[in-house]
């Protein structure tokens, strides 16, 4: 399946990339939960993996989380197909789903290079500016 532009329904953004469905939620009300379940059911056969990004979601209410879990369990979607991103995923995941907890702020590339690289002064096209006299 080709790359699809980002779409937004009820405050839930989604796109398809490399045969994976990516869903991003800013909040998780009952309307958003229903939208996520609808998207998962709609694209389950076309997508290998379904990533639900809930990093920006504060702790979802227990009633919404319970309703969402029940809807996922009653659907024909394989639990192993669904990956949650973020700590709120632990509140929303059913048995067999996976939860990915990502670093809060990835370091900038140049900063990581400087911290992880010890210059020997022989680097081809060196940009680290830490040359030693060789």
Image (tube, helix red, strand yellow):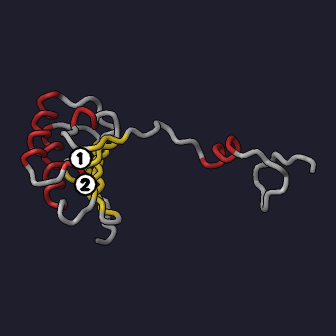
Residue 12, percent from left and from top: 24, 48
Residue 61, placed above or below residue 39: above
Quick check: 51 left or right of 40?
right
Residue under label 1, please give it. 11
Locate residue 6, reporting x and y percent: 31, 59
Q: Residue at x 19, y 61 (%)?
A: 43
Residue at the image position 30 percent from the left and 54 percent from the top: 22
**Circle 2/circle 1 CB separation < 8 Å:** yes
Q: Is residue 84 depicted above or below 48 in this figure?
A: above
Image quarter (top left, top right, bottom left or bottom right) of the N terminus: bottom left
> Callout 2: 10 Å neighbours few (<14), some, many (20+)?
few
- Note whether 88 is above or below 18 in the view shown: above
Classify mark 2: helix, strand or loop: strand
Residue occupied by mark 2: 8
From what the image shows, is residue 60 above or below residue 113? above
Measured in 3D between alpha carbons, the distance from the residue under mark 2 to the one under mark 1, in whole angstroms, is: 6 Å
| Image quadrant assignment for residue 40 | bottom left
Q: In the rendering, which numbered label is found on residue 126? A: none
Which residue shows up at 17% across the image and 37% down it? 29
Count neighbours of disc 1 (C-alpha within 10 A) and say few if under 14, some if 14 to 19, many if 20 or more: some
Q: Return the x and y of residue 112 as percentages of the image width and height.
A: 63, 44
Q: Position of residue 33 (x, y in %)?
A: 16, 42
């Amino acid at each position: 399946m080709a790359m699809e532009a980002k779409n937004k329904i009820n405050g839930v953004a989604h796109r398809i990339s490399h045969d994976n469905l990516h869903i991003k939620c800013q909040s998780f009300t009952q309307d958003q939960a229903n939208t996520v379940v609808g998207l998962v059911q709609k694209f389950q056969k076309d997508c290998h993996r379904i990533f639900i990004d809930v990093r920006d979601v504060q702790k979802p209410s227990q009633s919404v989380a319970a309703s969402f879990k029940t809807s996922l369990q009653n659907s024909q979607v394989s639990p192993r197909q669904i990956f949650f991103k973020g700590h709120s995923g632990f509140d929303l995941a059913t048995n067999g789903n996976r939860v990915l907890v990502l670093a809060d702020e990835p370091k900038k590339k140049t900063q990581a290079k400087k911290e992880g690289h010890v210059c020997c002064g022989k680097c081809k096209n060196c940009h680290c500016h830490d040359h030693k006299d060789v």
